[in-house]
Image: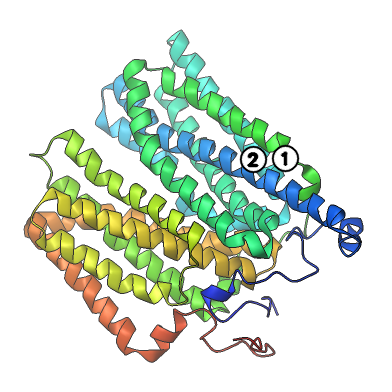
Amino acid sequence: MSTKSHFSASAGDFDGPPHKSVVSCCPTADNENRNTQAVGDGPARAPQARNARNLRLAWVGSALSMTAFRTLGVSYPLIALALTGSPMAAGWVGFASTVPGLLLYIPAGALIDHFDPRRVMLWTEAIRGIAAASVFFALLCGSASLPQLLVAALVEGALWVLHSLAENALIPMLAGRDGLRRALARSEMSFHTAVLTGRPLGGFLLGVGQAIPSAVNTVLFFLSFGLLMRMDAKGVRRDARPLVKVGDGLREVAQQPFLRTAMALTAFTNLMVNALTMVFLASSAELSPLIVGVVLAGGGLGGVVGSLVVLRVTPPSYMLFAQVWVWALALFIAAFGGHPASFAVATLVTGCSGALSNISIRTFEAHAFDSDKIARVASVSRLTSRVAISVAAPLGALLVTCFGGDGATVILFVTMVAVAIVVTAVPALRGSLIPGAERLMPGEERPAHS
């Protein structure tokens, strides 16, 4: 059996009292620490303090890394445009940074579960820093070229896949059962903060000087590397596992009705909100860049708000089911609000509920699977979301071309409502969106407190 049988039947139970014998989720915690927990508070407190410090270092390092990723996602295509004068060249550089997400998530998940995630993050940050530094020096010397930018963007996109999955595996190892919800909330907040700041920062730095974004991001990558180096390896080291088959992540997810439905729903809602974003952009010719930027910032701000909420309150077990109707309400506001502010409110609402749902799913994964299976499971979720986001842009543009901006928004709203009605009306779908409510796998027993 591939899954653990101790996860709770509701999201509210995920962060219940920890098992008395558990101090860290790290699978290789040394026996000496475990055996001394019952002797006194001092030995038990040591690994907890160590893991708390490691978590802080991991959060700050990941925030710096994510900000650099978002910044380079803007600056590399614009640098290509400045060097060649060709929008097509800028498009190819942007494509080079995104295509690894479509090709590498599944094999990368299997790879991360084979190695120590902290060590993977160290290697990715070092190579990303070298790649950014190479672009900086080439621009400084006047020798930068389109092929170099394409390679740098491809390397950045591929290593970001590895880094993000390794971080996904590392956080549960450090947080322990009782601190998992807060740890994941802070990780989610770091992501949305990077979304808010990274793209504007990239444009601002490029305005200061063409080589400045690469210089700043080189510093960010090596700062992240330094923070990871400062982590106490005793709390995060994991022995290499036998290399798992690439398709194992798909099989793990297939055995969990909640994850199957949640990932499908998340991919669909990502499709809707990103198509809505494209509809807004395609209809914003008469708006100022400032207004467009404020509207697009709504999603990141909503994600920060949702993450802050989870720091104080455990998301309800029905969060994924509620998300369907929350997003239908958001699309209603966008479709019939008649003002750019309505789009801003819609993205704020979807960002907030999306953060709550993401944390609920990640919490379930951390409790339902062993730590050496987290990355390959998360890789399936990341891939489905990436595919949906990739399809959303041409879908939104097609809807605007055929039906205009207002008509396209109404079509998205009607589609979202139809899906919400189906999910509500079909008991099997509705039940599968509540962790633990689905049928248990053969050989598993429902926890007594559920």
Quarter of the image where one finds residue 75:
top left
Distance Cα–Cα, label 1 vs label 2: 7 Å
- Mark number displayed over residue 182: none
- Mark number displayed over residue 231: 1
In percent of width and height, residue 123 lies at 66, 37
Q: Residue at x 32, y 51 (%)?
A: 299
Q: Residue at x 27, y 54 (%)?
A: 347
* Residue underneath mark 2: 57
In percent of width and height, residue 183 lies at 58, 55
> Which residue is the extreme one toward the front?
41
In percent of width and height, residue 159 lies at 56, 41
Find out whether the residues at labels 1 and 2 contact each other: C-beta distance under 8 Å.
yes
Q: Amino acid at mark 1?
A: Met
Quarter of the image where one finds residue 23:
bottom right
As helix, strand or loop, the secondary structure at mark 2 comes to helix
Q: Is residue 313 above or below residue 88?
A: below
As helix, strand or loop, the secondary structure at mark 1 comes to loop
For marks 1 and 2, the one nearer the N-term is: 2
Q: Residue at x 44, y 15 (%)?
A: 139
Q: Is residue 210 above or below residue 28?
A: above
Callout count: 2
